[in-house]
């Protein structure tokens, strides 16, 4: 091969690299064989408590839901996970059909009109919603976000918008929520961002809210929990203009924070303003139905600096995971998972509320997660739980210090009555 | 195997389900009737596990993939995805660990992140790395936000322009726009390098920085890279390295030593994590000491006692996403680097570049090379075959390759080359595979002259033939709609 190329040595292929900088030393560990590496990996993996080895009540944006075995079996198919982005539709019908089915299932679940092919995660889907709203509602530069939207999502929103001339407001005051955010809406507001169930787990009655926001010329973005939609009112029912979610609960493991799935939905009339890929239906030259990436003139590789976003790579394989999950669950399963979460979470809350010194402080109706006021600092309680093989709740001390000693507890269809009783036993002994 | 597979909704039968769930073991609580959904998920499908698995297995067979064939796909480094990586990412301590669990309960995961930060920093010559960004474009966004924050922190408020070569990836100008900066295009010269005179004319006190891919999108290493960095630095601008083509220079050159201030790594290109049909990826970023305080957080630090912890850089631009990046991809990239070591990584680039040049010299007499030079990991040729009718386009050549069992190369990119055909063999293909590919390309060139109708008709062996993209966009059907789909069928 060297001869064919006309060089004596592979080093000669790199003469364009400045000689003084060529072939630097890389100071890296020596290579390992597969069995040696498996041993090292198991040693690292073995140091992490996890939802298989422990009972877990930690949520706050990532949840231990059931992942049917068939989901990973499909994800392991090389035809899916080693495929490239489906730019060549003739040989990418598998990926394209799975994305089209994802878009179909997500619109059925949410009652929204269209869904794109995914964002990086729920937080970035929400941030892209804000950018879209600024492009739809021209001339307005204010985004109102409620305090009870997940604090990490609010942080990502601020990262994304920091270089644009935009004011983000509504979430300054601890302990406030939907009503206080809505009071901030004015004729400069492009978008209102609400979350339900919110960060504290509360489900809000949002009937009439969309109309109220829209009457002032702004859009409403509702961030939802896809599992809650097995039971509760949909963003479509509420009349949201945009609805986003973290799709991790739909068949995706905890993965120490990623890869997850950013769900993005909106109304048909905004289709030319959305970011990211979207799949449509057409025919081939023989008249056969075919799937294809469509409305591509929005995207960076075609529109460059006038694109709706710079997003290219997304979370296609995670969208496939959620598609297989929703197909397996079906109409009955989606509802049953939501019921199990709801009833078990309410059982846990009722049992904890009986303990002296503990109080459920999520106001109104909650779904699978709720906040509890504690008799001692959350860190002490979590340490006691940990000694009993339980990963405890999310310590609210840094996000909402005005609550005093408090934590969020998440209960899912994976949490049995026995798990809850064990939790209550440890809490009662504190 | 290539027959049409119905939509999942068309396979539904009322009353079926495909998942096994626990019985309710606690008393039922009252549901708030006025907050419930009204439709009972009426249009959700109902299938059994075998029906679901067969459906997705069948549609998977309508895909091309690295596991089934060869992708000479320029710009995207479709190398082999080692199977050990997949097992590693699925180990319970990685796959079932919660991102918010106590650091003391996650030392193995944090150690892996810390070590990958160190490895990536060493490989590219940067003292600081953040693994937060989820994809290359996300890393670019982080980088330009860091540039902006750095300038503002120094009281430098007038840097509103980003220089981008005309040959750049579309994500570069799109990123600049997301950060409110103006794109200024810089021309290339006759050798495919940045035109230094044009660059000198365009840098100014308004320059926030320059985004550059090196090797560039012509597959050429810009020999003047040190001068380019000096010119941009001389006006106070910063150099952004787009790492899409990093596969060419592992152990060959360190971008940090060439003069780059910041770079994103595409772990799903260079470091073998799979493309997943479009994602997930990982767009880790590295930078100089001067920019390190602005990196997105959290990053992992090592404490004096040897334990690992999450920390935010002092002047961080914020977080790019929830939690700590696409961790599952980080496990795969860590495993890849530990499999190869320093010598193995250099060999990756040597073989990638040798393979690319072998294909180039075997094809360039028939498919003219855009700029006749030794290339790096990929080469840009032109689908302009002597003696072929004018209406034989690069698209036709690409589609004909499908009939011969290959994924087409990247076509019509970079935009500055007419009829571009960008071929990146990668290091994981054998000479035998390359020879079959070369023979096929030469066969297609003969067909282009003798039987061009074969190219216009291609592909004929794929699950579907050429599709009507205009119809898809003009009457968009973006979700299952029985009537609309029936209309498309009957037209």
Image (cartoon, coloured by chain):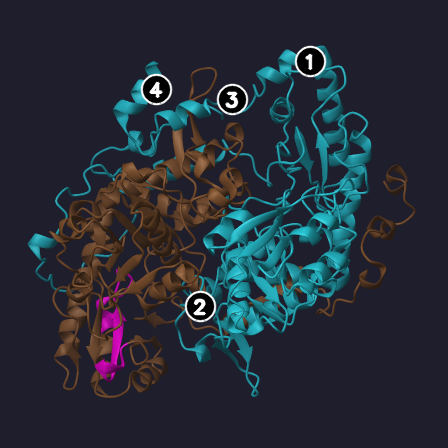
Chain colours: A brown, B cyan
* Dot label at residue B466: 3
Question: In this view of the protein, can residue B18 be seen by the observer?
Answer: no
Residue picked out by circle 2: B318
Is label 1 in a helix, a strand or a loop? loop
* Residue located 55% across and 64% down the image: B147
Q: Which of marks 1 and 3 is in front?
A: 1
Q: In which quarter of the image is residue B284?
A: bottom right
Chain containing mark 1? B
Furthest-right residue in this view: A8
Instruction: Check if mark 2's residue and mark 1's residue have beta carbons within 8 Å.
Output: no
Mark pair 1, 3: CA separation? 20 Å
Mark pair 4, 3: CA separation? 16 Å
Residue picked out by circle 1: B389
Image location of residue A232, percent across then percent down = 17, 52
Residue picked out by circle 4: B488
**Segment tinted magenta in the rendering:** A400-420
Image location of residue A41, percent across then percent down = 57, 67
Dot placed on the residue nearer the N-terminal end, 1 or 4: 1
Dot placed on the residue nearer the N-terminal end, 2 or 4: 2
Chain containing mark 3? B
Dot placed on the residue nearer the N-terminal end, 4 or 3: 3
Chain containing mark 4? B
A402 vs A273, nearest the viewer: A273
A308 sits to left or right of B283: left
**In the rendered view of the protein, which quadrant contains the N terminus of chain A?**
top right
Image location of residue A89, percent across then percent down = 50, 30
């Amino acid at each position: 091969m060297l001869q064919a190329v006309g060089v004596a040595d592979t080093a000669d292929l790199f003469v364009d690299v400045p000689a003084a900088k060529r072939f630097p030393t890389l100071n890296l560990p020596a290579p390992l064989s597969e069995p040696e590496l498996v041993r090292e990996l198991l040693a690292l993996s073995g140091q992490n408590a996890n939802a298989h080895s422990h009972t877990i009540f930690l949520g706050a944006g990532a949840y231990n839901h059931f992942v049917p075995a068939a989901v990973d079996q499909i994800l392991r198919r090389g035809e899916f996970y080693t495929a490239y982005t489906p730019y060549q539709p003739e040989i990418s019908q598998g990926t394209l059909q799975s994305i089209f089915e994802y878009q179909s299932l997500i619109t059925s679940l949410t009652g929204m009109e269209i869904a794109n092919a995914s964002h990086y995660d729920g937080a970035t889907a929400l941030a892209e919603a804000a950018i879209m709203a600024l492009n739809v509602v021209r001339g307005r530069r204010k985004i109102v976000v409620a305090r009870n939207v997940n604090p990490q999502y609010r942080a990502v929103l601020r990262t994304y918008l920091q270089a644009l001339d935009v004011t983000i407001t509504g979430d300054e005051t601890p302990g406030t929520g939907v009503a206080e955010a809505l009071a901030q809406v004015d004729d400069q507001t492009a978008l209102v961002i609400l979350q339900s169930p919110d960060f504290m787990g509360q489900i809000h009655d949002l009937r009439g809210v969309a109309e109220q926001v829209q009457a002032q010329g702004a859009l409403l973005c509702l961030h939802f929990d896809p599992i809650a939609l097995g039971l509760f009112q949909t963003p479509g029912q509420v009349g949201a203009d945009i609805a986003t979610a973290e799709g991790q609960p739909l068949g995706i493991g905890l993965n120490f924070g990623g890869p997850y799935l950013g769900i993005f939905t909106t109304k048909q009339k905004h289709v030319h303003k959305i970011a990211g890929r979207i799949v449509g239906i057409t025919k081939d030259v023989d008249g056969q139905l075919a799937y294809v990436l469509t409305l591509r003139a929005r995207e960076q590789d075609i529109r460059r600096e006038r694109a709706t976003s710079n997003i290219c790579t997304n979370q296609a394989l995670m969208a496939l995971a959620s598609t297989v999950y929703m197909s397996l669950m079906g109409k009955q399963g989606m509802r049953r998972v939501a019921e199990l979460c709801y009833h078990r979470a309410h059982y846990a809350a009722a049992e904890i509320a009986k303990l002296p010194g503990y109080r459920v402080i999520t106001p109104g109706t909650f779904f699978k997660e709720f906040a509890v006021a504690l008799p001692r600092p959350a860190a002490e309680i979590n340490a006691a739980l940990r000694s009993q093989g339980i990963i405890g709740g999310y310590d609210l001390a840094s996000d909402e210090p005005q609550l005093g000693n408090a934590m969020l507890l998440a209960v899912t269809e994976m949490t049995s009555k026995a798990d809850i009783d064990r939790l209550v036993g440890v809490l009662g002994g504190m | 195997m290539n027959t049409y597979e119905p939509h999942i909704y068309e396979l539904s039968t009322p009353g079926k389900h495909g998942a096994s769930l626990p019985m309710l073991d606690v008393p039922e609580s009252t549901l708030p009737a006025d907050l419930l959904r009204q439709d009972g998920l009426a249009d959700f499908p109902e299938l059994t596990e075998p029906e679901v698995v067969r459906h997705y297995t069948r549609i998977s067979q309508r895909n091309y993939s690295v596991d089934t064939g060869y992708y000479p796909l320029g710009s995207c480094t479709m190398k082999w995805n080692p199977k050990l990586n997949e097992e590693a990412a699925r180990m319970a301590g990685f796959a079932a660990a919660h991102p918010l669990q106590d650091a003391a309960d996650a030392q193995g995961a944090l150690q892996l992140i810390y070590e990958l930060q160190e490895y990536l920093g060493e490989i590219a010559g940067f003292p600081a790395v953040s693994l937060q960004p989820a994809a290359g474009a996300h890393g670019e966004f982080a980088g330009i936000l860091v540039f902006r924050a750095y300038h503002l922190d120094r009281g430098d408020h007038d840097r509103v322009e980003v220089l981008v070569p005309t040959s750049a990836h579309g994500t570069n100008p799109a990123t600049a726009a997301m950060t409110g900066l103006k794109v200024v295009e810089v021309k290339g010269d006759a050798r495919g390098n940045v035109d230094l005179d044009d660059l000198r004319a365009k840098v100014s006190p308004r320059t926030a920085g320059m985004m550059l891919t090196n090797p560039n999108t012509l597959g050429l290493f810009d020999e003047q890279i040190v001068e380019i960095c000096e010119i941009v630095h001389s006006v106070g601008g910063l150099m952004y390295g787009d790492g899409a083509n990093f596969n060419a220079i592992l152990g060959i050159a360190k971008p940090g030593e060439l003069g780059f201030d910041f770079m994103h790594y595409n772990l799903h290109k260079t470091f073998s994590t799979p493309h997943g049909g479009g994602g997930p990826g990982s767009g880790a970023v590295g930078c100089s000491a001067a920019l390190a305080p602005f990196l997105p957080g959290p990053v992992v630090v090592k404490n004096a006692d040897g334990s690992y912890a999450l920390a935010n850089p002092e002047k961080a631009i914020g977080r790019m996403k929830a939690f700590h990046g696409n961790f599952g991809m980080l496990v795969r990239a860590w495993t890849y680097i530990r499999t190869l070591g320093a010598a193995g990584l250099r060999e990756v680039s040597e073989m990638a570049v040798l393979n690319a040049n072998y294909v180039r010299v075997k094809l360039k007499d028939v498919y003219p090379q855009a700029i006749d030079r030794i290339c790096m990991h990929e080469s840009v040729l032109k689908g302009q075959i002597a003696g072929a009718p004018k209406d034989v386009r690069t698209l036709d050549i690409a589609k004909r390759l499908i009939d011969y069992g290959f994924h087409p190369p990247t076509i019509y990119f970079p935009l500055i080359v007419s009829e571009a055909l960008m071929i990146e063999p990668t290091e994981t293909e054998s000479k035998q595979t390359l020879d079959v590919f070369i023979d096929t390309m030469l066969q297609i060139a003969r067909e282009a002259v003798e039987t061009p109708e074969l190219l216009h008709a291609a592909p004929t062996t794929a699950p579907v033939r050429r599709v009507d993209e205009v119809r898809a966009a003009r009457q968009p059907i973006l979700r299952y709609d029985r009537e609309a789909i029936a209309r498309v069928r009957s037209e």
